[in-house]
Image (cartoon, helix red, strand yellow):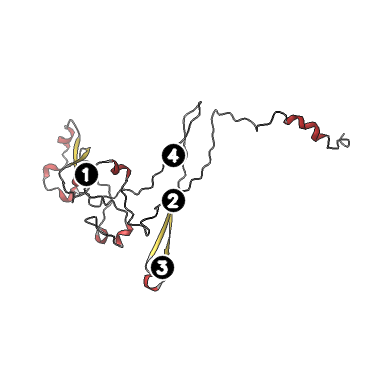
């Protein structure tokens, strides 16, 4: 569940200026196989946005040779349906656009399922902060390569935050566990001499009126 609230400035010179606070809540159920010897469950969480490669290459605009278009007969007979993904696939302004970024399935570039940024929100280069760009958390890596940071997002900028120095997120975890299965739970633990107190307690009860 996602929600956010906005707080606007109160002085006359900045009435259009605002700060937004957002929050996200997740509820999950975990099913595990039988663990007769016990186990430790560990959860990890990483708060990162979906990477938006706004300068990614659009093959519908860059393709000029008909021989590069999909061909059913040729592609079906291809013994190894893999192709090279060049650097300009993610960034058309890459300094070495024809270099090898990685590998992708054959004709993968024609599966267009990505977000496009245009108008005043488009940034052709990683330049200084702009107010319009504060609406978008784009990936501004120059000359991206297939490395550890491509998966872990280690170098994510903080330009969308009003405070770019403080921690961007806080996390609160509340949990409740319910085990169902072959686990046997015993009764409350009683001390060894707990039963010896029975007579001392019942002696204080007037039981003569009880027939």
Mark 3, Cα crowd under 10 Å, few <14 / some 14-19 / many 20+, is few
Residue 170, numbered label: 2
User: Image height check: is 194 above or below 49?
Assistant: above
Sequence-first disc among 1 and 3: 3
- CA distance separating discs 2 and 3: 24 Å
Residue 9, numbered label: 3
Mark 4, Cα crowd under 10 Å, few <14 / some 14-19 / many 20+, is few
Side (left or right) of 194 relative to 55:
right
Total marks in image? 4
- CA distance separating discs 4 and 3: 39 Å
Per the image, the residue denoted by label 4 is 43
| Residue positioned 22% across, 41% down in the render | 108
| Residue positioned 31% across, 52% down in the render | 157
Sequence-first disc among 4 and 3: 3
Side (left or right) of 168 relative to 40:
left
Residue 29 makes an appearance in the image: yes
Mark 1, mark 4: which one is toward the viewer?
4
Sequence-first disc among 4 and 2: 4
Query: SS for tag 2?
Result: loop
Front position in the image: 12 or 77: 12
Measuring from the top left, give residue 163's x and y in whole percent.
38, 58
Pointers 4 and 2 in contact (C-beta within 8 Å): no
Per the image, the residue denoted by label 1 is 110
Mark 1, Cα crowd under 10 Å, few <14 / some 14-19 / many 20+, is few
């Amino acid at each position: 569940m996602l929600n956010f609230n906005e707080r606007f400035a109160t002085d006359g010179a900045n009435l259009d200026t605002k700060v937004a606070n957002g929050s996200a809540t997740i509820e999950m159920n975990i099913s595990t196989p039988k663990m007769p010897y016990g186990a430790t469950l560990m959860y990890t969480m990483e708060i990162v946005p979906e990477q938006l490669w706004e300068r990614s290459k659009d093959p519908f605009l860059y393709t000029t040779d008909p021989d590069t278009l999909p061909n059913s007969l040729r592609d079906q007979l291809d013994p190894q349906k893999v192709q090279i993904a060049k650097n300009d696939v993610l960034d058309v302004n890459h300094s070495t656009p024809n270099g090898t970024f990685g590998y992708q399935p054959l004709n993968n570039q024609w599966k267009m399922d990505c977000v496009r940024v245009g108008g005043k929100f488009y940034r052709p280069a990683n330049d200084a902060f702009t107010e319009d760009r504060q609406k978008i958390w784009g990936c501004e890596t120059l000359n991206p390569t297939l490395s550890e940071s491509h998966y872990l997002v280690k170098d994510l900028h903080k330009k969308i935050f009003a405070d770019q120095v403080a921690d961007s997120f806080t996390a609160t975890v509340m949990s409740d566990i319910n085990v169902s299965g072959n686990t046997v739970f015993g009764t409350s633990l009683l001390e060894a001499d707990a039963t010896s107190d029975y007579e001392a307690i019942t002696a204080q009860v007037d039981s003569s009126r009880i027939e």
